[in-house]
């Protein structure tokens, strides 16, 4: 194996990728511009919707309000509550979104009389409508205040202090550091995003320099050169790694801008101190590098085996969907992997990233991840090199 020959192939493919407008779009434009705009847009419109639903009064109907005059007075005094009155089709009005809440007070509702069991107030709302959820929260708070006033009044009639029914108070103290909080938030979303960025960056280039060359008929020219098949595969492999890593890094830069912008829905990250040590960052990228190599090797293998771009895209799609599925598991809270599970590619990266972002360094998990990813990468490269020597694979129709 001659590294000079590998370097020649590498620079040839890189220069071709730079001239390819599609590669530049997938490697630079999409991660650095499209992703930030996408996440900023989602965050902006989410915040706008929340602000609008919080600013408008909640339209509510009370059925049987005459049985609870004190509660009605509490609702009427609240500026965020707009009571409306019509007799028919009240449930249909709630379903249609004309009102946001329907309160039903029973006829026997009388909190001033002695009772053996609490009186029920039936409240209907639509959990799929944001305005209805806001109305539910507002009315819940008002009813809780109303309930507390009734308790205080009853205790006063008995000559008891309000603290009599609250013998215990709890005081919560969060021992988590600001860095650990940041790591917990990033640990849910960052591994999933990294997996997407790596595969998106590698997919087009890996298919184009293998199956694409077959389809264009330019591969035969390369095969008759003095270069060995393995050197050609390695040159193309390093090209895919470079493009994938560049796309991922630019994507992370773009997403960092989006996450830390005030308009983003998770903008509280900008208020949390981010102060990870150099060793944590080093371990993070140490674990990340084999994942980039793994994705590049598998996609290159698929491109070599496929007859054309269309067939390669067919094979790549389930691989990409499987990678997304494994990456999505990191979004779930409370899931812990058993030790053997850290040998599953992508899944192990997601949870190792999670641990590192929270400041946890588990060398068993790190080593399992590295061994698994590097081992599968070597196998994929050897298979790719073998297929590249098979004329019936390279020139099959």
Image (cartoon, rainbow, N blue to C red):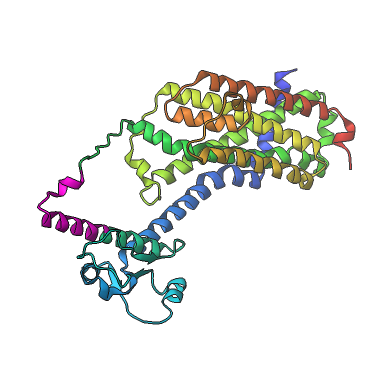
196 vs 142, left or right, is right
Residues in magenta, as a range? 144-166
Which residue is at 28% across, 68% downward?
Answer: 109
Q: Which of 53 and 100 is in front in this view?
A: 100
Which residue is at 33% across, 34% downward?
Answer: 273
Whether the magenta-drawn stretch holds residue 357 is answered as no
Residue 179: where, in percent of width, then height?
36, 31
Q: Is residue 247 visible?
A: no
Q: Nearer the viewer, residue 326 or 43?
A: 326
Residue 312: where, in percent of width, then height?
76, 43
Q: Which of 261 and 340 is in front in this view?
A: 340
Q: In which quarter of the image is the N terminus?
A: top right
Quadrant of the rendered structure where residue 232 is?
A: top right
What is the count of numbered marks? Answer: 0
Which residue is at 43% across, 46% downward?
Answer: 258
Q: Can residue 123 be seen in this view?
A: yes
In this view, the residue farthest toward the left is: 159
* Magenta stretch: dominant secondary structure: helix
394 vs 272, left or right, is right
Q: Nearer the viewer, residue 90 or 178?
A: 90
Residue 30: where, in percent of width, then height?
56, 47
Q: In which quarter of the image is the C terminus?
A: top right
65 vs 26, left or right, is left
46 vs 290, left or right, is left
Quadrant of the rendered structure where residue 396 is?
A: top right
Residue 173: where, in percent of width, then height?
27, 34
User: Does 203 sit above or below residue 376?
Assistant: below
């Amino acid at each position: 194996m001659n590294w000079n020959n590998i370097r020649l192939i590498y620079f040839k493919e890189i220069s071709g990728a730079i001239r390819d407008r599609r590669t530049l779009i997938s490697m630079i434009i999409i991660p650095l511009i499209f992703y930030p705009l996408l996440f900023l847009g989602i965050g902006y419109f989410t915040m706008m919707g929340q602000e609008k639903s919080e600013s408008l009064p909640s339209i509510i109907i009370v059925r049987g309000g005459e049985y609870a005059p004190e509660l009605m007075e509490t609702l009427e005094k609240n500026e965020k509550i707009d009571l409306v009155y019509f007799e028919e089709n009240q449930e249909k009005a709630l379903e249609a979104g004309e009102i946001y809440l329907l309160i039903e007070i029973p006829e026997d509702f009388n909190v001033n009389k002695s009772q053996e069991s609490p009186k029920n107030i039936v409240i209907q709302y639509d959990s799929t409508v944001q305005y209805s959820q806001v109305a539910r929260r507002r009315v819940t708070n008002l009813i809780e205040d109303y309930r507390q006033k009734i308790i205080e009044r009853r205790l006063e009639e008995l000559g008891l202090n309000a603290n009599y029914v609250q013998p215990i108070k709890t005081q919560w103290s969060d021992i988590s550091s600001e860095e650990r909080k940041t790591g917990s938030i990033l640990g849910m979303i960052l591994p999933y995003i990294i997996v997407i960025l790596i595969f998106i960056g590698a997919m087009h280039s890996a298919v184009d320099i293998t199956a694409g060359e077959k389809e264009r008929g330019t591969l035969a020219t390369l095969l008759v050169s003095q270069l060995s098949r393995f050197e050609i595969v390695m040159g193309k492999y390093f090209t895919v790694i470079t493009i994938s890593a560049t796309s991922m890094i630019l994507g992370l830069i773009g997403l960092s801008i989006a996450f830390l912008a005030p308009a983003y829905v998770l903008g509280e990250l900008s208020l949390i101190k981010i102060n990870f040590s150099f060793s944590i960052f080093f371990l993070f990228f140490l674990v990340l590098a084999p994942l980039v190599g793994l994705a590049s090797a598998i996609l290159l293998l698929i491109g070599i085996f496929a007859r054309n771009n269309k067939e390669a895209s067919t094979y790549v799609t389930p691989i990409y969907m499987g990678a997304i599925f494994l990456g999505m598991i990191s979004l779930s809270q409370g899931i812990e992997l058993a030790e053997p599970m850290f040998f599953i590619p992508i899944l192990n990266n997601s949870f190792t990233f999670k641990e590192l972002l929270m400041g946890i360094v588990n060398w068993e998990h790190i080593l399992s991840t590295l061994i698994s990813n590097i081992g599968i990468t070597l196998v994929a490269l050897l298979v790719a090199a073998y297929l590249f020597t098979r004329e019936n694979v390279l020139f099959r129709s």
